[in-house]
Image (cartoon, helix red, strand yellow):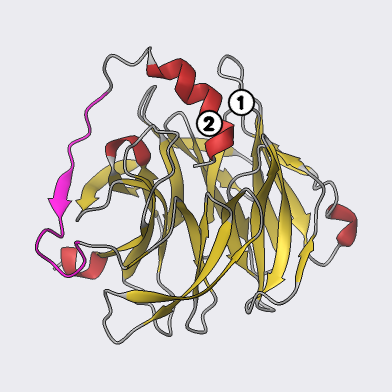
Amino acid sequence: MNKPLTALIIIILAGMITSCSTLRTVQVGQGQPWEKPYVEGMTGAENLSFDGKGNMFVTTLDGYVYRVEPTDDPFRGRIADMIKLGDSCLDIEVTPEDYLLVAVLTNKNAGRIARLTRDFTAIEFMTGEIPGINGMALDMKGSLFIASSDVSIINPRGCILKMDLDDDSTWMSPPVFIETSCITNGLSLNQDETKLYYTCLNSSVVEVDLKTKERVSILSQGMFQFFDDLDASSPGVIWFCHNSQYALIEVKDGLIINAYRVGDLKAPSSCKFGKRPGFNSAFLYITEFGMKGRSLKADGRGVFVLPVNELKK
């Protein structure tokens, strides 16, 4: 969750919320080795990505990027390196050439995309300032989709931008791919990269056909339910972070089929299935934004893991 972007909204809504729709969740992981964080020692873990070469990269809302390595214990990782890039780091993607692309907040309501090497030795900013920058998704062709929004509650103006890594003319001012008419948060591509999914902060998940740009709302829960980032796994299945309910939600064909509270995890912000080597592809790795949902206090400890394969037995 983009802390500066949502600050105004949360402050106004704080006094308005008297009730919200109840989501029936199942507590899992108590007494299991994955009850506690997979890795901790961070402040406000925001997003994560894998390079497929044994590294996980995690962004935090106090401006850091962490490189995390696996250990012999599949439920514990370790911090190998870290670097501070700005006031706040949001989403992160890894290119086929092994560069990291990081959405870095550069002022109160805008940010730029930084490109850096996996060993953190070379850093450059690729774009100009992007208002309300948040989630990103990178396809295999080198197209980067970027969530951009304002902070209006009455008439939010969100969009998804698209820049091509091979076309530097799109870097400084990435063109609009589609308008979203909401505060756009997380982005994820399906496996064959024909559809793009995005979450609206005010509790909806939308599917976009990348060829026709047709949009279909596949889930909506009403007001005051804060949806954060998401990951599209098998065909028709999406997992997303329900920040205000401390839950990981599995959606299939537009229906909620599972809602889990995971161990000691509090307010989640993003989730991705692991990428080998080192990270189990049947495990969902989850960043913890904070200790309380709908909060401005980004005090989450790090990354948790949900062994989805164990739950399906």
Which image quarter: residue 163? bottom right
Where is residue 214? Give x, y as percent: 61, 39
In the rendered view, would you say 102 is above or below 278?
Answer: above
27 inside magenta stretch: yes
| Residue named by callout 1 | 151
Q: Residue 14, relative to residue 215: is it above or below?
A: above
* Residue 207, horizontal then vertical, whole percent: 51, 43
Q: Which residues are magenta?
A: 21-35
The image shows residue 104, relative to residue 303, as above or below, that is above
* In magenta stretch: residue 68: no
User: Do the residues under discs 1 and 2 have CB atoms within 8 angstroms?
Assistant: yes
Residue on which disc 2 sits: 6
Q: Quadrant of the C terminus?
A: bottom left
Toward the viewer: 103 or 177?
A: 103
Along the line of sight, which residue is nearer the eye, 16 or 44?
44
Q: Residue at x 42, y 31 (%)?
A: 203
Local crowd size for mark 1, using a 10 Å CA cut-off: few (<14), some (14–19), many (≥20)? many
Dot 1: element:
loop
Mark 2 or mark 1, which is nearer the start of the sequence? 2
- Left or right, 35 with respect to 207, comes to left
Compare residues 288 and 159 and report the one nearer the observer: 288
> Would residue 175 be found to the left or right of residue 279 on screen?
right
> Which residue occupies the foreground of this view, 93 or 77?
77
At horizontal 57% and vertical 29% (from top left) the residue drawn is 182
In this rendering, does residue 288 appear at all? Answer: yes
Residue type at the position of mark 2:
Thr
What is the x, y in percent for residue 239?
37, 52
- Name the residue located 38 percent from the left edge and 32 percent from the top edge: 294
Does residue 277 lie above or below 214 as drawn?
below
Percent position of residue 66, x then y: 52, 67
**Does residue 142 show up?**
no
